[in-house]
Structure formats: structure tokens, C-alpha cells
Image (cartoon, coloured by chain):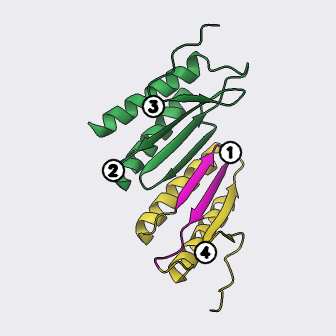
Chain colours: A yellow, B green
Amino acid sequence: MNVAKLPDGWESRGKPPTLFRRFVFGRYNETRDFLDALAALTDEAGLHPQNINFASTYVNITLDANDSGELGEAELSLATRINQLYLKKSD
Amino acid sequence: MNVAKLPDGWESRGKPPTLFRRFVFGRYNETRDFLDALAALTDEAGLHPQNINFASTYVNITLDANDSGELGEAELSLATRINQLYLKKSD
């Protein structure tokens, strides 16, 4: 299986694999905006992260493998779209 | 120092002490509503949790000790108000 290159900043952890990335922010309001946008994105994608863990200036996101225990197209594309949210936040 | 009785469902962990509680929900929408109400409450109280860790049907909240390393009035009252949010959610 050709392990697709992981989206920037994400790492694969554990078995079955999950995708993990830590997003850091300068101020609570930026974190808050990112969380709100993330909620809207995951609702629209119909794919909710295995876990989201945050405080005032960071958000740790863990995405599940799919039902066949792999990081498939949907997971990789969600991670990519979350990256785009983060880039939009900091410009 | 008279250790005030901890608000229902919360436990004190570690040194300096933090307050911890796990809130469980039947559906993602309930979790989402609780998180939104929690954000508004912590903004208003001006006291942000040390960490919030959630997935579709649970929210784990950890509150910091105050600057003198104690669980003071502000921390205990925030925990109590978060309990009230949760009770309102499930009635």
C-alpha cells in the first residue's frame, strides 16, 4: 500500500494509525476562532476527530483511522483542510 | 486551611492541585452546545481552564490552581457554574 505523504505537520501514531498535529496560537481569541471554524468544518465533512485537546494557546487534534483501520482519503483530506484553516488564521 | 468541599463530580489532582471532571453526553450536538456555553462562561468569568479535552460524547475539564497554588473561591465557583451548565443541558 502506497502510504500517501502525510499532510504538513501531521504525524501518524499508534496501531491502528491515528493522525496527530499540535496547532499553536498567539492569543486565546485566535484559538477560539480556530476551534469554531474546526467545528464547522468537521460538521460539514461529517468526520469528527477522535479527540481534540486544547487550552488558551494550543489545540491538539487526533484523527481516527477509517473503518478498515487505515488513514484513507477522507482522513488525509480532512487533515489538509484543517491545515488550510490554520494558515488562514495566521495570515 | 479549611479545604472547601469540592463541587459535585469534581476531583482534585496533583500538586499544585487541579480540579478535574469528565462530562458525558448522549449525542455530539449536546457536546457541541455544552462546549459553546462553556466558552461563553469562561470568557465571562475571565478564567480559562488549564485544559479541555473532548470528542463527540465527552468533555474532560481541568481547572488550574490560583496564583498562590490553591483551589480558591474563583476556581470552586467556576466548577460549580460548569456543573449548572451540565445540569441545564441534560434536563
Give the label on residue B26, or none: 2
Tag 2, which secondary structure? Answer: loop
Q: Quadrant of the N terminus of chain B?
A: top right
Out of A85 and A58, give the one closest to the viewer. Answer: A58
Q: Tell me residue B36's x, y (percent).
A: 44, 44
Name the amino acid, label 4. Thr
- In the rendered image, the vertical position of residue A11 relative to residue B64, given as above or below: below
Instruction: Report the span colored magenta.
Output: A50-67
Chain of the residue displaying label 1:
A
Identify the residue under disc 4: A80
Chain of the residue displaying label 4:
A
User: Which of label 1 and label 4 is nearer to you?
Assistant: 4
Q: Residue at x 72, y 22 (%)?
A: B67
Same subunit, tags 4 and 3: no
Q: Tell me residue A43's x, y (percent).
A: 42, 64
Give the label on residue A27, or none: 1
Real-space CA distance between mark 2 and mark 4, rounded to the nearest whole angstrom:
29 Å
Q: Tell me residue B13's x, y (percent).
A: 63, 31
**Of the residues under marks 1 and 4, which one precedes in the sequence?**
1
Q: Residue at x 68, y 58 (%)?
A: A23
**Of the residues under marks 3 and 2, which one precedes in the sequence?**
2
Give the label on residue B31, or none: none
Tag 4, which secondary structure? Answer: helix
- In the image, taking residue B85 as reference, residue B59 lies left or right, namely right
